Image: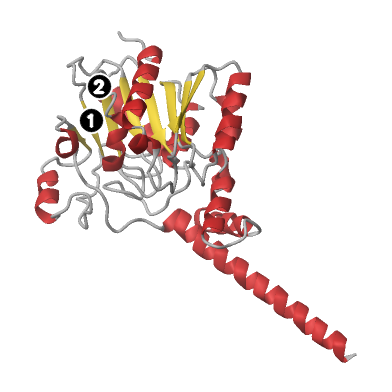
Amino acid sequence: MRGRVWLGIGVVVVVVAGIGYLAYVGAEGSRRLVADAPSRGDCRTPDVQFGWTYEAINYDIADDAVLEARNPDLTDCAYMGTKAGDSVVTDDGIRIAGWYVPAGNGAGPTAPTVVLVHGFQASKSGVLKYGEGLHDAFNLVAFDLRHFGRSTGDETTAGVLEQKDLRAIIDWLERTKHPVHVGVLGNSLGAATALLEATTDQRVEALALDSMHTRLRYQVEARLQQNGHPAYPGPWAIFAGTRLRTGLDLGAADAEDQLSKVGERPILLIHGTADDEDLPVRTQAFYEKVLARGIRVDLHWCDGSGHDAPAGMPVDVCRDAFGAWVREFFTSTLATP
């Protein structure tokens, strides 16, 4: 009898501990995924980074001089500038700020334009280098997704709502510059956002997707394991937590589920062989699915790079090759006027 009592107590303790653990993982994991934002970051302008001429989108360009005055190190800014104005606003009320960088060859605003979409915990400053190989021949647009940089918002949603940010920027581009052709280059979160937007926006003619997760669940599993937790059942708790915080299913932006809606638009995949969040084997499987659908798809591997790789992301490790890959892809897919 006494043994049964102790067994029952033990079961209760295990159950309570399990519930407490899942509640903690769900709350903390969803906070980091949805509500967390860096308090400091890179705020270098196109001129500071590369000497490029640029136009401020939806904020006063004079405030960039204030950035330089208030931040001794522009790669680690405590002051990120005034928030965006009212000329680029999503349909759910988020104000978006960005930069327009004219092509180095002086082709003019109607020439092919590539929109750069940054990753998680990043900003328009960090994504500029992704366009380094494109600047000579293409107009570029870089912008802050919601919750980062100069844009407003207090949540990140794995691409589900960020799609609206990209669409607002493409609307601005179409309204003010009238480019004949538009492509999108996205990194990680930005890649998922780009693919999702392309499913409903025919203005996006070609997609370059760098270090993209094919399912958000895979990335959540990897991050849990990297922090000393088991792969399961934590993801269930985290997705429950994100739904409570946002009211959204963040898995709705998963690339594997969106592929059938992209149509025949060409895709470039770039991925690091040392990526331990978005595993190379999954990118290879995604590539084969794209091929099977008869879509033009190019795949380039960057040795030793990836999320959390000591050497850095593909754009850092394979800088020259990365520039050549995206330049050749968009040159062949965005026909010149």
Amino acid type for the residue under numbered disc 1:
Tyr
> Residue 94 vs residue 192: left or right?
left
Tell me which corner region of the image, top left, top right, bottom left or bottom right, holds residue 117.
top left
- Looking at the image, residue 234 lies above or below residue 5: above
Amino acid type for the residue under numbered disc 2:
Lys
Residue that extends furthest to the right in the rendered view of this protein: 1
Could you say where residue 95 lies in the image, as x and y percent from the top left? Answer: 31, 44
- Looking at the image, residue 135 lies above or below residue 156: above
Mark 1 neighbour density, 10 Å: few (under 14) some (14–19) many (20 or more): many
> In this orientation, which residue lies closer to the viewer: 219 or 256?
219
Could you say where residue 33 lies in the image, as x and y percent from the top left? Answer: 47, 54
Query: From mark 2 to mark 1, how far is it between C-alphas?
Result: 10 Å
Of pointers 2 and 1, the one earlier in the residue sequence: 1
Could you say where residue 259 lies in the image, as x and y percent from the top left? Answer: 57, 28
* Residue drawn where x is 31% and y is 38% of the image: 127
> Residue 142 vs residue 184: left or right?
left
Mark 2 neighbour density, 10 Å: few (under 14) some (14–19) many (20 or more): some
Could you say where residue 186 lies in the image, as x and y percent from the top left? Answer: 40, 33
Count of numbered badges drawn on the protein: 2
> Residue 118 vs residue 44: left or right?
right
Check disc 1 and report its element: helix, strand or loop.
strand
Judging by the rendered image, the residue that carries numbered circle 1 is 100
Judging by the rendered image, the residue that carries numbered circle 2 is 177
